[in-house]
């Protein structure tokens, strides 16, 4: 039967939390890709390590299994041809495929932080549907289908200018359903 699924951890924390060299490298990534926090970097590192682990297990397997794995990565847009390409992946390769980065590179947002804000405020459409997750991985087929929502223009009520006989002033009155 379908029981409650156990929520699994998507990342692992670094062993030394206050390592100055690692912290400086992470700060550069946070600034370059407009990340919310370091946890997003740790998630990307975990994803890359899973891909590398899978590639290592495929080294001894036949080419059809390897090709299925490579095709899946190429569909995402990683440009993989053999196992050594998978082992050379970094978290920056993951960050380059994020929706937030694509908005900034396509010049739909002026800054990387603005791109994140547009996404979170549900102003971005991917293939006609709203996506509000900045870490959404954009596949090759979805690259050209990223657009911003059109802003709705509020209609103003028509105004009629009426001459006030007593004060000799022009008044503006809002017309509702053709009545003054």
Image: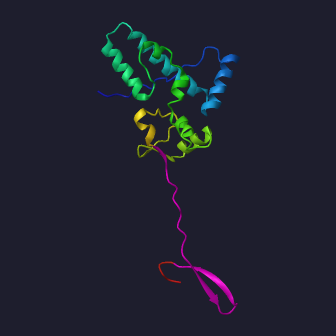
Kindly indicate the quadrant of the structure image that contains residue 55: top left
Q: Nearer the viewer, residue 38 or 143?
A: 143
Q: Is residue 15 left or right of residue 84?
A: right
- Note whether 133 is above or below 14 in the view shown: below
Q: Is residue 4 magenta?
A: no
Picture residue at 60% right of the left edge, 32% below the top: 33
Kindly indicate the quadrant of the structure image that contains residue 144: top left
Q: Nearer the viewer, residue 136 or 59?
A: 59
Please state the horizontal and vertical placement of residue 69, each as a whole percent of the image.
37, 19
Q: Nearer the viewer, residue 163 or 68?
A: 68
Q: Is residue 25 left or right of residue 133?
A: right
- Note whether 153 is above or below 122 in the view shown: below
Please state the horizontal and vertical placement of residue 84, each as a whole percent of the image.
46, 12
Q: Is residue 162 left or right of residue 148?
A: right
Picture residue at 58% right of the left edge, 19% below the top: 13
- Note whether 158 is above or below 48 in the view shown: below
Mark yes or no: residue 2 visible: yes
Please state the horizontal and vertical placement of residue 76, each as a whole percent of the image.
43, 28
Q: Please give the range of residues in magenta.
A: 146-175
Q: Is residue 163 magenta?
A: yes
Picture residue at 63% right of the left edge, 88% below the top: 163
Mark yes or no: residue 35 visible: no
């Amino acid at each position: 039967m379908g029981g409650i699924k156990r929520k699994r951890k998507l990342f692992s924390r670094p062993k030394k939390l206050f390592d100055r060299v690692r912290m400086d490298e992470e700060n550069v990534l946070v600034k370059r890709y407009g990340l919310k926090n370091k946890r997003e970097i740790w998630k990307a590192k975990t994803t890359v390590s899973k891909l590398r682990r899978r590639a290592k297990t495929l080294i001894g397997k036949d080419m059809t299994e390897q090709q299925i794995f490579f095709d899946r990565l190429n569909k995402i847009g990683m440009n993989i041809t053999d196992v050594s390409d998978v082992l050379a992946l970094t978290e920056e390769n993951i960050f380059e495929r994020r929706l937030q980065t694509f908005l900034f590179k396509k010049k739909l947002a002026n800054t990387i932080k603005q791109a994140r804000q547009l996404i979170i405020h549900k102003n971005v459409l991917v293939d006609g549907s709203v996506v509000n997750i900045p870490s959404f991985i954009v596949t090759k087929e979805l690259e050209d289908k990223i657009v911003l929502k059109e802003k709705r223009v509020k209609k103003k009520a028509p105004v009629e200018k009426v001459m006030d006989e007593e004060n000799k002033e022009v008044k503006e009155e809002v017309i509702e359903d053709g009545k003054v």
